[in-house]
Amino acid sequence: MHCRHLSLLALLIFSLSSLTSRADAILPDIGGSGYSVISQQQEYQLGQAWARMLRGSSRIYQDAIVSQYVEELTWSLVTHSQLSDRRLEIIVLDNSAINAFAAPGGIIGVHTGLLLTAQNEAQLASVLSHELAHLSQRHFAAQLEEQQRNKPLFLASLLGSILIAAADSQAGVAAIQASLGASASSKLSFSRQNEREADYIGMQTLTSAGYSPHEMAGMFSQLQQAARFSKVPPEFLLTHPVTQSRISDALNRAHNFKGKAKKQNSIDFNVAKARIQVNYAKDLDALIASYQDQLAKQNNDSLKYALAFAALKNNKLALARKQMDSFSRHFKTRLSSKLLTAELHTAEEDYEKANKVLTSLRAVYPGNHAVSFIYAQNLLRLNQPRKASGVYRDLVENNPSDSRAWYLLAESYGLEGNIVGLHEARIEFFLLTANIDKALQQADFALKEPDLTPNEKARLQQRKEDAKAIRESLEFNF
């Protein structure tokens, strides 16, 4: 991890401990929540600052099809949850470690390794439901209030440990173990109480959304199995300890479930998992052979998609096309199939054909960020940066926290010769990744550009003031 992120982490730990020690004097009672130590708005502000640090210290997964799927699945669960404050940000991290986490203020992080471990969508949904329960029950506020009476630094160090883990698996494991080891048994008991409550409420969310409650216990078992065959336990187990009693409790609740589960898996889950498997594969030839062996035993569209995508990534375009031609009629109508067609045209360097497919998809799926990202990338290959910039602008307007979209918008502005736009987009990217000094430096560079209009000067000056305010927010001076 870079020194900048270590210093920010140190600031986080120091400031949270100061926040706790000063809580009675500066933090209002929010009423019916039961927590006087921190309000929901303050939790949200804390989460926004923490997310900036997370984006700056961790790799965001670049496959928009995967991130779109995780976001859509999470939001489908939110409607069945007890979450009242629905200002959420879902961040998919490029990290093969098995982990997911919720942070104050509606931040949910999902490691790609979790999708590789889950056997089906219901298991992934069980983890997301559990994290949503932590947010809806405000367990961070509860933990902070408990630690105020005991050890104020514990929550700060645990948050910092999760931040380290997002960027560096080995360091994160050591930090989390140290955080948990420093806590007395009474505090661990409080944590176990939170976990039981999150299991219980998470299962309610899971079943309300139509998934089998048995899959929560199944996911717990998967995590335990992963721990047995690894020298380093899955990070999820360090912040969410899974005991045999938790598995038994989950199984008992599942057996008492009276409803009927309608969903277990989806093609979209299989597609996302396959794309991650292919992107992480060290030997694509071996992976292709494995998919071919599986297809010989079980012929289905998900496996055909996995083989086609692996072949495409391995530049075996004839094999990819052969598999895509064999998709079922129904699967060929799905967005994932049509996007793969566009990706194949791109690999064949037939950018006009890809553009035709993507233009049609933009009309059918307006606002879909996977379609938009792939469409904009293809426009740049067609040497149409101005049009690509328009697509990226739509993306950041719909999701102002999307650091990747801001980065690509800056690149697109540069290609079209929009220098002021390039500066402004870079400023936003730096602010979203807690690079405050670079944001201020970029603003100074921009202000030296000749022929700036009064409006452009005013915007840039305002962003400098905003950058200073964001720096203050990173110091958690609520």
Image (tube, helix red, strand yellow):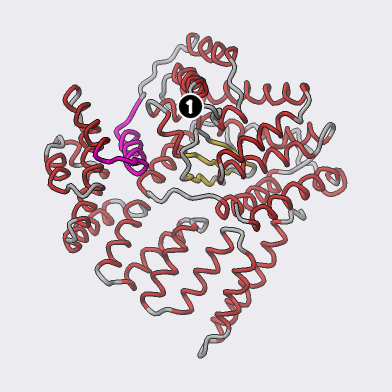
Q: Nearer the viewer, residue 66 or 33?
A: 66
Q: Residue at x 53, y 41 (%)?
A: 109
Question: x and y percent of residue 25 in the render?
Answer: 87, 47
Outermost residue on the right side: it is 25
Q: Nearer the viewer, residue 431 or 320?
A: 320
Is residue 374 located in the magenta-colored stretch of the structure?
no
Callout count: 1
Left/right of residue 125 with respect to residue 472 in the rendered view:
left
Left/right of residue 137 with respect to residue 404 in the rendered view:
right
Mark 1 lies on a secondary structure that is helix
Task: Assess disc 1: are there few (<14), some (14-19) or many (≥20) residues with their C-alpha within 10 Å of its C-alpha.
Answer: many
Question: x and y percent of residue 53 in the render?
Answer: 61, 53
Is residue 284 located in the magenta-colored stretch of the structure?
yes
Which of the 4 quarters of the picture holds residue 186? Answer: top right
Outermost residue on the bottom side: it is 451
Q: The residue under label 1 is which amino acid type?
A: Ser
Q: Residue at x 40, y 62 (%)?
A: 394
Question: x and y percent of residue 165 in the render?
Answer: 59, 41
Q: Image height check: is 195 above or below 349?
A: above
Which of the 4 quarters of the picture holds residue 325? Answer: top left
Q: Image height check: is 63 above or below 257?
A: below
| Residue range highlighted in magenta | 265-285
Residue hosting label 1: 126
Q: Image height check: is 388 above or below 114?
A: below
Question: x and y percent of residue 280 in the render?
Answer: 37, 42
Q: Nearer the viewer, residue 47 or 170?
A: 170
The chief SS type of the magenta part is: helix
